[in-house]
Each structure stands twice: as C-alpha cells, then as structure tokens.
Amino acid sequence: MFTDAHVWEGTARRLTAAGAQVRAVTLAGPGRPRAGDGPEPDAGAHAEGEAEADLETHIEEVCAAIDAVTGAPGGTGGTGGTGGTGGRGIVLVGHDYGVHPVLGAADRRAERVARIVCVDAGLPQDGVPPLAAVPDQSVRALPAEEAAAGTTAGVLPPPGREEWTRWGSTAGVSEEALDRLTARAAPQPLGTLLRPLRLSGAAAAVPTTGVLCTANGVGIDMVQRLVDLGDPALRALTGPGVTFFELPTGHWPMLSCPEDLAGVLLRAAAGEGHRLTPPGASGTPAHLHPFPLPVPELPRERRGNVDFYFPRPGGTKGVKGAEGVDGPRPAVVFVHGGPVPAGAEPSPRDWPVLAGHARYAAGQGAVGVTVEHRLHDVADYPRAAGDVAAAVDLVRADPRVDGDRIALWFFSGGGPLLADWLAKPPAWLRCLAAAYPVLAPLPNWGMSADSRFHPVRALADAGHAPPPLVLLRVGLESPEIAATVSGFLAAAGEREAEVRVVDVPHGHHGGGPGDPEEEWRGAVREAVRAVLDRLDA
C-alpha cells in the first residue's frame, strides 16, 4: 500500500549479493515511478489513467514480471517482486496489499512459480476484495462508501508521517527511513482495494511461506492456536508445502531489518521454515486442556448465549454467609476471548477452561456464569460488547442472583471488553478480573488511538475510582501482549487503583499441556478466592 519498489532496496542488495536475481515491481498508481523514471517520484507523473488502476491491473503487471524472467541463475524478490531459476523457479514475495496481486499472478502462472511468500500478510481468499484486509477499520469506511455508490474511481490518500501505525507497527524503522517512506508515499487507487480477487485454485498447489512480524501482533504460536480452533479457512495452513518464519520487528521488515528478511527469504526459497500441525495432531489444544482444579458436577442451565451453574442447596464455605443459605447469591460472569471463528466446535462456553471456572466458582458458593459472544473478527468488538452487556442484564434479573454483587472475568482477547466497564462502572460491579488478557489493541488490529476498546486508556482517563481488579498474569506471555499488561499496571499505579496480581511464572498464554500444573492450580485458586473476597466486601 502506498509504496513503490524503493522499499525493497536494502533487501534486494543482500539477495543479489547471495546470488539471487531480484526484480522489485512498482505497481501502477498516480505519482509512482515506473521503468525508466528517475529515482524520485513526481507528484504529477502518471496521474492520468493510473488512478483507474485496479487489482486486475496489478495482477497483469506481476504476470508480466514473471514472463520477463527467462534463464535466471536463481533467486527471489518482492512485490511486489519476482526472482527465478528459469522454468518453475520463481519465488513471488508480497507484502501487505502486495500479496493480492502476487497470489492472483501465481494462480495464472502456477507452472512458473516455485513458492509464494507472504510478508506480514494474510492469505487472501477467492472472491474477497483487498479492502477486507485493511487493518484500520475507520479507513475501510471511505472505500466502502465509494463501492456502495457504484464507483471504484479515485484514490486513497497516503498516510502522513504520524499515521503509518494505522497500517501496522513501525517498530524498528529508523526516523530517516520513516521520513523517506512518507516522502515517497503515493495514493492508492481505490479500484485495487474494491475489486474482488478471483482465483481458479491453481495457486493452491504452489508452496507458500508466511513471514510473521511479531511486533505487529502475530506470531507462529498464535497462528497455531487459531488453527487449533478448527476454522476450515485455516486448515490449508497445515499443508506440507506451507512454512512459517518469525521476525521480531514491525510491519515493514524490509526497512527495519532488510538483512534478516533477506536471510528468511533465501531459507523460504529452499523450503525451510516452521510447519503447523492440524488440530489435535500434536496433543490436546490449549483451549481444550483440562481445567486444573477439581470441580463439582453441577447441572448446567442454558438460556440463549448464557450458561448458569448454581451452587448446591445449602451453599459452601467459599462465599461469606453462603453456607446454609438458599437465597440470592453473588455471581461471577466469565467471558471468553477471541476472535473465535463462527461455528467453532466445541463452542467457547463448552471449553474446559470456561466451564471449569464457572463450576469452580459455583462450588465456592457463587453463581458461575459463562457468556458466549460474537467476537469472530477484531471488527466485532462492539457487537461482542453488546452481547456481554445483555448477558449481564439477564444474569442480574434472575431471582436466584444477588444483582448487587456481580464480578466480570475476561480471558485473553476478551480483555479489550473491560474498557466499557472501567469507563462507566455501575455500583453493582464489585470486581473486574482478567486472565492472560490483551489490555490494549495490538498493532495489526487497525484500531485508532481513540478506540473505545482500550482498557489502558479507559483506566487512565476514568474520572472515578475503578472497581477492584484481579489480574492473572503468565510469565511466558508474548512480548506484544505482555506490553499491554505492563501498560495497564502502570496506569493502575498512577490511579492508585486496587489491583491484585496473581502470577503463573512459567505459564504460557492460555496454558496448555507443557505448563506446570501445580503453578496453574495455585494461581487459579488464588485468583478465584480474590474475586470472591471482593464480592463479600
């Protein structure tokens, strides 16, 4: 998006030095240099007609670059770019939007392409326009309005210097490189974003490599967890020809670490890389790992998207005054993370971790509740927030629940849903809890700086004392998520908020078979106890 071949210069030099033939392709668009142009773009160059360029235009340009490669001695390149050994020896590399014309060209020249490499980009699907992959949700609105009006003409203006983070993390990019990126940025023709990608299926047979830039929010472990959820659209990622690499940098590795990227591209061309496993092939997925504590066998009462687990008559010793009392009880509402593919089986409320927490809370004398919400994509947070709010209303309206003593507990990617409750906590909300949460939008989510779903900022900006907080933190969290937790705790410290942190020193995000069970047992027991104590306060 918005760039030309200059972004590949550092990586191309290193690949060429390694013996590869490299062709970096500048795709059509107003103000972009083309073959024979000088090194600096002219704002008025190629304006006429090139604003009308669309995805088909760019696919044809990549096909032409492939056709121009004849008896090359070997190599790789980026798009955009191509490289090859002649015959079926070309490696096509696409970054960000560039993966769409790369995949479209590979579909038409599958016999010439040895491998497709997607640099910090998803794998596009047939019939889906590139606009769907634009991270900044607010940016999607303008092209969508144009499409609704029946036009694909016009352009999307390039970002200003401080706006590149709306398109991905700039971690590792020097000030000088960011200045040059901004100076050379050119408008993106709207037709390149609105026209659906059409694939025959031929490209599915071409080996593929994904290069994940972890500072942008996604790593191999996260992709494996998404695959484990059973989304059919991700099943292809476990194929024998699919490999992955990680780079600890932001969304523009060709600018932040060109030498490392060149090394990864050469290894990808050689067929190296990490391979994902199909769901269940390497043991029980983390989200289906057994709950670490013994729980009572309590009946489940299902009402729409809400499951209730009520204590046995007579209560237990866990909640103050509960023993021998059959009146209304306080409730702990457990909210799963995400995004979770629609139709995932088993559904989140049947996952052992969610149902286990609810049963364990009920065993301690509270009403345990699980809520299933519709967070299927990062754009779904408003809808998921509505689902949770409606579920809480349902819980509080139940005569068996003490509606003035409610705790909400969020897991993982459900963490951003905390923000609403931090911003405007009702009097009946006695405690907020979170387990291995994401507490600020990750860079690749495309949320604006003033996003509603930003718990760190909601806590910092609240004009009142927040409810007591309980945070279950894992010691082996990914750096990107850990940074959001650190930011949240810093904001809590500045607000002098009441926060109880419970650590699992050797625990991973979501736990799993390899984690120390005793640590998890102790931590979950302590965290639940802390929440119940605050319900009693």
Image (cartoon, grey):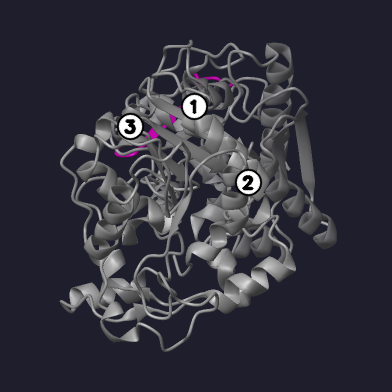
Which residue in the protein does label 1 denote?
270
Task: Please identify the residue farthest to the front as the structure is shown.
Answer: 71
Identify residue for label 3: 231
Q: Which mark is residue 14?
A: 2
Q: Nearer the viewer, mark 2 or mark 3?
A: 2
Residue 510 visible in the shown view: yes
Q: Earlier in the sequence, mark 3 or mark 1?
A: 3
**Circle nearer the viewer, 3 or 1:** 1
Secondary structure under tag 2 reads helix
* Above or below, comparing residue 26 to residue 498 in the picture: below
Question: Residue 528: horizontal and vertical position, in percent?
Answer: 66, 29
Q: Amino acid at mark 3?
A: Asp
Give the residue at x 50% y 19%: 312
**Helix, strand or loop status at disc 3:** loop
Q: Identify the amino acid type marked 2.
A: Arg
> Upstream in the sequence, badge 2 or badge 1?
2
- Taking depth in this image into account, of 182 and 82 the one nearest to the observer is 82
Q: Is residue 438 above or below residue 35?
A: above
Query: Mark 2 or mark 1: which is in front?
Result: 2
Q: Amino acid at mark 1?
A: Ala
Q: Say left or right for 412 vs 187.
A: right
Magenta residue span: 304-315
Q: Is residue 306 magenta?
A: yes
Q: Find the residue positioned furthest to the bottom.
A: 44
Left or right side of 123 for 275: right
Q: CA distance from mark 2 to mark 1?
A: 16 Å
Query: What is the secondary structure assignment of the residue under circle 1?
Result: loop
